[in-house]
Amino acid sequence: MSQEKVDRYKKEKANRAKIQKKEKRVLFLEKFGIAAVCVVAVGWIGYSAYNLVTRPDPNKEQEVVTTEMDITALNDYLTGISSEKVEE
């Protein structure tokens, strides 16, 4: 090995810990950025799908359902109970 290579190797070896630390930090930031973009994309797709499903259809007519109930028997029964209590 030439002296240049030896000096370069010694310099790289002296800074190896610092270089590895920097590489780990850059890798972490890249992974964090990719994960953040994925979370935002999934959230956006979910929000859009939810709005699409829950949106009322303007072309569809809303049906009104009415229910009629005959409560005369119930009223007669309750009236009978309250008149029995008054008589006692």
Image (cartoon, rainbow, N blue to C red):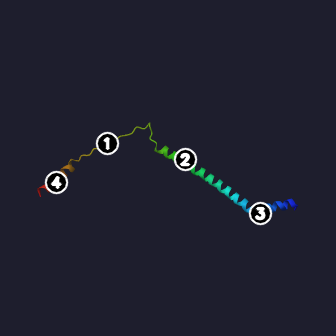
Q: Nearer the viewer, mark 3 or mark 4?
A: 3
Residue 1 occupies which quadrant of the picture? bottom right
Q: Which circle's residue, 1 or 2, is located before the other in the chain?
A: 2
Q: Nearer the viewer, mark 1 or mark 2?
A: 2
Kindly identify which numbered label has been placed on residue 66: 1
Alpha carbons under labels 1 and 4: distance apart? 31 Å
- Badge 2 is on which residue? 44
Alpha carbons under labels 1 and 2: distance apart? 39 Å
Residue at image point 65% right, 57% down = 28
In this view, 13 is above or below 78? below
Asked if labels 4 and 2 touch by Cβ distance under 8 angstroms, the answer is no
- Badge 3 is on which residue? 14
Q: Which circle's residue, 3 or 2, is located before the other in the chain?
A: 3
Give the left or right position of residue 63, taking residue 40 as reference: left
For numbered disc 4, what is the local secondary structure? Answer: helix
Q: Position of residue 54 (x, y in %)?
A: 46, 44
- Badge 4 is on which residue? 82
Alpha carbons under labels 3 and 1: distance apart? 85 Å
Q: Nearer the viewer, mark 2 or mark 4?
A: 2
